[in-house]
Structures are given as structure tokens and as C-alpha cells.
Amino acid sequence: MLTAITRQVSPSINKCELTHLERQSIDLTIAKNQHENYVNILRSLGMMMISLPPEADMPDSVFVEDTAIVLDEIAVITRPGADSRRPETISTASALSAFRKLDFIKSPATLDGGDVLVIGKTIFIGLSSRSSHLALKQMQNTLSPYGYHITGVEISGCLHLKSAVTQIAEKILLINPKWAKENSFAGMNFIEVDESEPYSANALLVGKSVVFPTAYPKTQQRLKAAGIPTIPVDISELAKAEGGVTCCCMIFRS
Ligand code: CIR
């Protein structure tokens, strides 16, 4: 069975970190409704849902993906690259401790879960402004004994590795080739995003289903043409905080 941990939208989301977007007002009611709909979609895919309560003083805390990497054998609690986000890990670590042995990224290393793409026993880590080479080394030390191979990926122009590339089928990645290079991912096939939708590489694969934002119809058409149906979700308010569909959950086998 799959379990998904999510966290309700913080009432302070308008104070979120922003790196590549101009600040726009986020309507809290719409954001909460969109998030609830997203949670319902995950539930409808058969997952057991764990919803953490909102954190009033942690604006970005709905983006739980950044706080931990959950593997079958262990969960690694991150040390997020933005100072404001570090306290978010306390409650996710507590929730995950019921399911996994925990390890922790240690100071001064920093890692955001959005930079970590796990494909089987290979773990790609985006070397972004949030995730350091030192964290990559710590991940190697912690996870090599479990048979994982860790590899760094250069990205540019986007916040996280998974802003640039996500897995949409066993051997297929959805990618924005301007932000990450295809030759970083040996043995994989690619669908490139429509150039007019640079943010559309962030899709959420659950089993064989692909949850995909309604904001990107041209890339959605490309997926459809490739025989990959999508489940549409409107997360436009959360996108104003630079969040996508992978960021709002941590999914693991339970
Ligand atoms: C941040 O800058 O940390 C948040 N405003 C957005 C985080 C999005 N997380 C993700 O892509 N994994």
C-alpha cells in the first residue's frame, strides 16, 4: 500500500520564499480548496492519506516534499536550503518515525527534497541554490550501504531538479531541456515540455497515473499523444509560491 503525507496550507503562505517568480497575492481560501482537491485526488488513487496540521509560522510548509527523502529502507530528513524552512522538518520527522528508521542531513550541508529524483536504485540530486555538494556526499555515505547510486545533476534557470525533470513512466522523463540536460539521465527516454510552458516538467507519478497541472495544456497534449493519460489538478494558487504537484506530498510504500 502507498501512503502520502501532506500538510495543510499555512495561513502565512503569502510570506513564502520566492526565487524565480515575482510576488503575487495568494488567495488563501482558493489555495486551501485547491490543496484539498489535490489531497482528494491522491486519496482516489488508493493511497492512505496522512494530513499534518497547518503550521502558522512556516509559510512554505505545505511543500512537504522538501523536508524528507523516503525510501523503502530509510527516510533521510533534509536540512532545507532556505533558513525559513528548517523548522518544517521537525513535524515531518516525527510523522515519518512511525514508518521508517531516520537519518538526517547535517549542518552545514543543505538539501531540498525537490532536488531529489529517485528512479529505482539511482538517486539524482540537483545541485541547485538549495542543495549542496556536501549533502550529496552525506547521501552517498548514508545510502550506498542500501545499494543506492547517487549522482549529481547540474541545473540552471529553475528552483529545483524536479522543476526541470520528473518521471512519468518507468523509462520516461518529462523534461525542460533548457533547465536540465538529457545526457544526465542515461538509459531514459524523454518527452520535452512545450517551450511556452517552461514550468510544466513537474508531474506526479503515482503507480501508473500521472497527476498534472491544468495550467499546461500544450504539454498535456504532448503526454496524451505519447499515450500517457493525465489526471488534471488545478494548483494555480500554490504555483504562485513556486510549488508544483510533486512538492505537496511525500509518497512511500507502507
Ligand atoms: C520555496 O521556495 O522553498 C517554496 N516557495 C517553493 C518550494 C517548492 N518545492 C518544491 O518544488 N519541491
Image: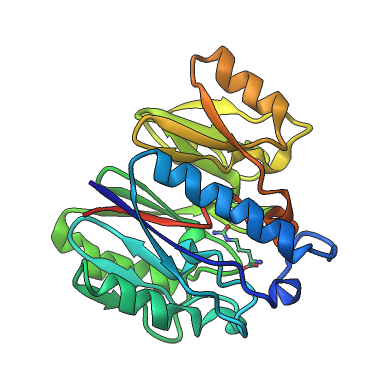
Q: Is residue 165 above or below residue 253?
A: above
Q: How is the image coloured?
A: rainbow
219 and 214: which is toward the camera = 214
Residue at 56% x, 39% y: name it. 181
Asked whether residue 245 is in view, the answer is no
Find residue 184 and report its horizontal and vertical position in percent.
47, 41
Q: Residue at x 58, y 13 (%)?
A: 225
How far from the left and from the top, in percent, is residue 55? 55, 80
Q: Quadrant of residue 68?
A: bottom left
Q: Nearer the viewer, residue 166 or 248?
A: 248
Which quadrant holds residue 197? top right
Which of the pair 108/40 is nearer the observer? Answer: 40
Q: How many marks?
A: 0
Quarter of the figure that contains the C terminus: bottom left
Q: Residue at x 21, y 66 (%)?
A: 99
Using the image, determine if residue 115 lies above or below residue 61.
above
Residue 175, x across and y down, in percent: 57, 36
Q: Quadrant of ligand 1?
A: bottom right
- Residue 81 relative to residue 193: left or right: left
The reply to whether residue 252 is in sight is yes
Q: Is residue 54 left or right of residue 32?
A: left
x, y percentage for residue 115?
49, 58
Residue drawn at x 22%, y 72% is 98
Relative horizontal placement of residue 25, taking residue 197 as reference (left or right):
right
